[in-house]
Image (spheres, grey):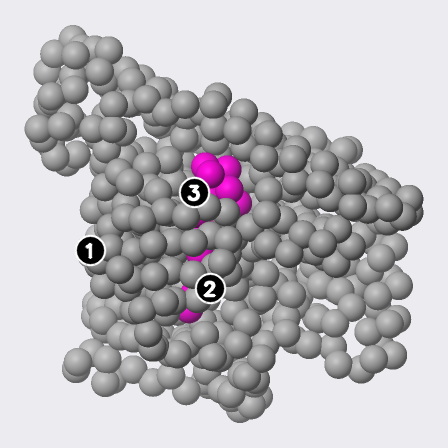
Amino acid sequence: MAGEARLSWELERLEDRKRWWVRDDLYTLEPRTPLSADVYNHFWNEQALWIAEKMSVPDSKGFNVITVNGYTYLGPLEVTDEDLVRERAQVFQARLEALIRDVEVDIPRYRSEQETALAGWKGMDLSRRTAMELLESWRQVVLTLDRFYKIHFLIVFPRHVVTGMLHEIARDAAGIQSQAEIGKLVQSMGVTRQLHLDMGLWRLAAAVIALGLRDTFLNNSAEALGPMLRVDVEGRAWWEKLDEFLAEDGGRLIVPKELSSPTWQEHPVPVLETIRMFVGLGAVFDFDGLQKDQTAEREQVVDTALARLRDGKERGRFEQLLGMAQRLQVAMEDDNFYVLNMGGQVRRVALEIGRRLTASAALGHPEDVFFLHHHEVESLLTDSVTGIYAVSEVRGLVSERRALRTAQRASKPPAYLGSPPQEIHHFLLNNFWGIRDLGQLRDEGRVISGIGASDGTAEGIARVVLQADELKRVQGGEILVVPATNPAWTPIFSKISGVVTDQGGSLSHAAIVAREYGIPAVLGTQNGTQRIPDGARVRVDGRKGEVEIL
């Protein structure tokens, strides 16, 4: 491809070329616009270093994050000096115990802070702000997002560590060898913000049928539903229910961490598409029954582990870690709501800046603002106010960057840069991204191996989805095959029968949600989307961690 040939994957800094990097597919399924890469990857890079330093992680200083042709790559920072590892381990243990001790106080405090901040931004009338006030708002909203992500790391990182420690005891001391079985220890801990959202979508689907709108939904595309539903009493009554849902849960970006992506409120077509699918499935989902069954499974695994732990001290440690892992599991799922919705507020401020810059002829369209870098947004807004400097030349720059992003989308970004070791030993890369060794990249045979992250087996049609806007292709009962999933994709889990991902480990989002919905999951295959043909019939075995093409 011509677009692909012009892209270079060589890193700019010599020091970076000496290191190895792995591509992130959990959050970067398509190349990011310059503004999104600046905002999100800067935070991610800083906060990975910040939490590792704050916690004194024994064998890691976190990881660096770089953007190459719009794609995100992670570079682990390992601590190899054994004396230093032991020294850091002592500090780490003390700080982890402090987090465990204070979590019941800290999490409500975090939630209060986030609720107040989010409500303040949602209620702010940006159109009444002067350009310089808007510049101040931009800086403040970016700092607010930074704070939300710091809170996120204060919840997520301890969750990963505590859950990993719990898994280790369950495996080594209690003899539970199946990763899928171990994962049940923290499943079904009540109605989280994410599960509440899913239930809301199913209730909207039930309201479609109750109001006699079933045929309207099933016989028309999601794009056509908006104008059609507003012409009669029943349609308007249903749309009011949708507006109530979106007012609470619709502030998230359709594509997480991509500011050029509209929110559900701006563009509810993906929401309508999901509801339309639920209507076709009868608009009935037994959440109560699911919770009951998943809770019974959890309690059975807990009882089995406790019965095998004879040593009182070991048993006590298991119970302490179990309680904390379960609490942090809920906190993490709830926290995704705040992080995702705060991203929508950053977009809102950026778009208002884009409107001002369009009015001053600096940009051709408000959405061009996403093709500027962070520092360019600030300087261009300032220059447009002075009226002294030529600002129209930026239009040509935006045009070039739009064309470059088209080439980036058409490219095939390498799975890694540099020379990773044959076996990768890194807690987060192993357990969250599901990246373990380079051998995972082999392309051979009809059986694809990965991590069995959620128990059970399922047969069905494989639906290979590479981008979020392709989710509408997924039909009820199919096997979702994706590079990775993120919290914005959760509603799809209530209509599929299994999930296969390229990236993702036992601690990842896909593992959590698959267990909550009781569907098998094989994660971290690294190349499942390449090896499994779209439309092929497959069997997913979540215990063995295998997918067979039938």
Tell me the quadrant of the picture where the N terminus can be found. bottom left
Q: Please tell me how crowded label 1 is: few (under 14), some (14-19), or many (20+) other residues with Cα within 10 Å.
A: few
Magenta range: 510-526
Percent from the top left, x then y, of residue 363? 25, 57
Residue 34: which disc? none
Q: Give the crowd class for mark 2: few <14, some 14-19, many >=20 residues within 10 Å.
A: many
Q: Quadrant of residue 281?
A: top left
Q: In the rendered image of this protein, does residue 272 appear above or below residue 526?
A: above
Residue ID for mark 1: 535
Label at residue 519: 3
Say what secondary structure mark 2 lies in: loop
For residue 524: magenta? yes
Residue, x 49% and y 79% (percent of image)?
438
Whole-number angstrom distance, CA of label 2 to CA of label 3 = 16 Å
Dot 2 amino acid type: Gly
Q: What residue is shown with label 2?
A: 450
Q: Nearer the viewer, residue 68 or 20?
A: 20
Please tell me which residue lies in front, 376 or 154: 154
Query: Residue at point 29% right, 18% down?
Result: 206
Amino acid under label 3? Ile
